[in-house]
Image (cartoon, rainbow, N blue to C red):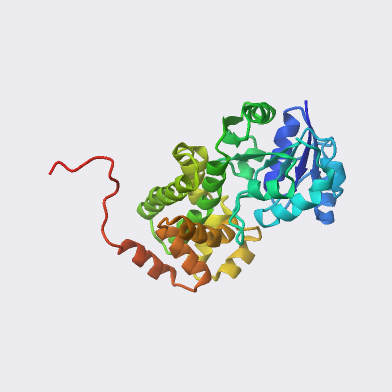
Amino acid sequence: MADVGIMGAGSWGTALALLLFKNGHHVTVWSVDEQEIRMLSEEREHKNKLPGVMLPEDMKFTCDMREAVCGKDFVVLAVPSPYTRNTAGQMRPYVKKGQILVDVAKGIEEHTLLTLSQQIGEEIPEADVAVLSGPSHAEEVGRGLPTIVVVGAKTKRTADYLQKMFMNETFRVYTSPDILGIELGGSLKNVIALAAGIADGLGYGDNTKAALITRGIQEIARLGVKMGGAAESFMGLTGIGDLIVTCASVHSRNRRAGYLIGKGMSMQEAMNEVKMVVEGVYSAKAAVELGKKYGVDLPIIGQVHAVLFEGKNPGEAVKELMMRDGKAEHNAKPWSE
């Protein structure tokens, strides 16, 4: 049994808090929003983000960061990616040397091009930073539907420990040392999911969706491998697995935002309508800059960026993708002649 702090009381933080509580751990959930903490404490339900998922009376909720971090066996960071660095900086006075911090958000910082674990490492260098990612919508984890994820850590010891803490009959956890690959897959797939949503909003079909998923994972993998990630990570749960679920699911805020853009909304109008942080919007700028930095062609991501930030017509963006110069799909086998 562990004593666990959860930083962030949104849908994902709440779902993981319930999972860990059911696994027999003591759980304290923190949020900066006093009204949210009051609702969770009194109603025992996140009515806005996880309606119908009831929370046990013994689960603690607090606005006191010290209470959620000090003395905990490990702490889960589930705040939206734009707030990760700031939250980690505020946590630092309460984190002991070697304390395990598990980031479960997905994103890349726009101005530094750092992943979330790298940001946390800068703010709290004495911590043991790990990540948890995969095809795992909070709405389904909260309901106890079978889900499989990956924990990435610097040491096998930390990865094995977290695997044991999180895993149960409905939540299977694999381990990996490839933290970078895990984070890049989880972040960049949100940009491709925006493209998938835009295609849905334009009225395109399954053929288009399949093309975006298969060519999208090629873009992600090309960049990820060039940056030092393992190719296997992009072909696994945190690569193609997470990409499939985010491009296809009704729960995906990135697909939903893209759909609204395809229907004619601006980026800001779509984000306001979704009412949650759309991680892919933030990652799109960083992804384009990473492509330039590492000399990797990212045609789909580039067109999404143009639609989001340059006012490009979504239909025109699709046309440009379709009319690019013809190429071989791969060069794994030579031509016979």
Tell me the quarter of the image containing the N terminus.
Answer: top right
Q: Residue at x 53, y 64 (%)?
A: 260
Residue 292, how many percent across, how many down?
46, 60
Front in this rendered view, residue 222 or 313? 222
64 left or right of 18?
right
Q: How many marks?
A: 0
Tell me the quarter of the image containing the C terminus.
Answer: top left
Q: Residue at x 49, y 61 (%)?
A: 288
- The image quarter containing residue 27 is top right
Q: Residue at x 40, y 67 (%)?
A: 317
Observer able to see residue 52? no
Q: State whether residue 321 is above or below residue 123.
A: below
The residue furthest bottom is 311
- The image quarter containing residue 178 is top right
Q: Residue at x 44, y 72 (%)?
A: 313
Residue 129, how many percent across, how many down?
68, 40
Residue 195, how many percent across, how many down?
46, 59
Front in this rendered view, residue 185 or 44? 185
Front in this rendered view, residue 106 or 43? 106
The residue furthest left is 337
Observer able to see residue 238? yes
